[in-house]
Image: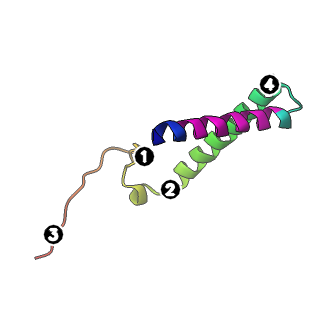
Amino acid sequence: MADQVQVASDTDQLEADVTAVIEACGGDPRTAIKALLVEQHIREQRIERLAAALSFGYVRGRTGVMPTGGSFSHRETTRS
């Protein structure tokens, strides 16, 4: 029962957000879609720039980016 209330609440908030975006674009849904697509493109470019700025050693390959010039090996070091 609580899950249904949460879903309804999330749906209501989503509908309110959609209405707000359309109203912010003068009531034109096509303009609202264009604005959202432009915003998405800007965010994707920002993520790409930030990912490129991370050093490979810092992320340790978690982004799927391999260092240029070949492969690398991971050696586990232990203290004796």
Instruction: Please provide the residue range marked out in magenta.
Output: 7-22
Q: Are marks 1 and 2 in contact (CB under 8 Å)?
A: yes
Q: Are marks 1 and 3 in contact (CB under 8 Å)?
A: no
Disc 3 marks a residue whose amino acid type is Thr
Return the x and y of residue 20 as percentages of the image width and height.
78, 38
Q: CA distance from mark 1 to mark 3?
A: 26 Å
Camera-side residue: 45 or 8?
8
Residue holding disc 3: 78
Residue holding disc 4: 29
Label 2 sits on a secondary structure element that is loop
Return the x and y of residue 59 as percentages of the image width and height.
41, 55
**19 displayed left or right of 1:** right
Query: Which quarter of the figure has residue 22?
Result: top right
Disc 2 marks a residue whose amino acid type is Leu
Q: Is residue 30 above or below residue 1?
A: above
**Mark nearer the viewer, 1 or 4:** 4
Q: CA distance from mark 1 to mark 2?
A: 10 Å
Of callouts 1 and 2, the N-terminal one: 2
